Image (cartoon, helix red, strand yellow):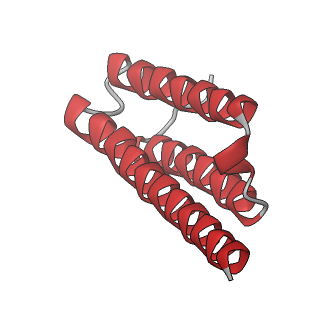
Amino acid sequence: MKEVSREHAVELLQNEAQRIRRLIANQKNSLCVAHCKAFEEVVDTQMYGLSRQVAYAIQLGILDSTEGQQILSDLEKNLDLLYQEVYKEQHVAEQNDEDITLK
């Protein structure tokens, strides 16, 4: 069995977190984030999967719990900012539509 270095394990987990960020960013461009409940479930599932991978790495002693929680926390903060941005853009677009309608 091949031995896994701590650095490689952290890199793999960071890559997985980045993949989730890209998934959200790609959907942001199509505004699906604001309108698709199914998309929210996909993100939740991806986050759950990453959390299980982090927990497994912690159990193996490859990652300490602080570092594992930091990976998840950083991703959650990024996702929260992205959601805020999307909903802000959506609100501005709705306001513009209302302004046009009132004129």
State the image quarter where residue 25 is shown.
Answer: bottom right
x%, y% of residue 85? 49, 64
In the image, farthest residue toward the left: 66
- The residue at the point 35 percent across, 16 percent down is 59
Residue 58 or 5: which is nearer the viewer?
Answer: 58
Q: Give the left or right position of residue 9, taking residue 77 as reference.
A: right
x%, y% of residue 67? 27, 41
Q: Is residue 69 above or below residue 81?
A: above
- The residue at the point 51 percent across, 35 percent down is 4
Q: How many marks?
A: 0
In the image, farthest residue toward the right: 30
- The residue at the point 38 percent across, 19 percent down is 60
Residue 7 or 33: which is nearer the viewer?
Answer: 33
In the image, farthest residue toward the front: 103
x%, y% of residue 23? 69, 51
State the image quarter where residue 93 is shown.
Answer: bottom right
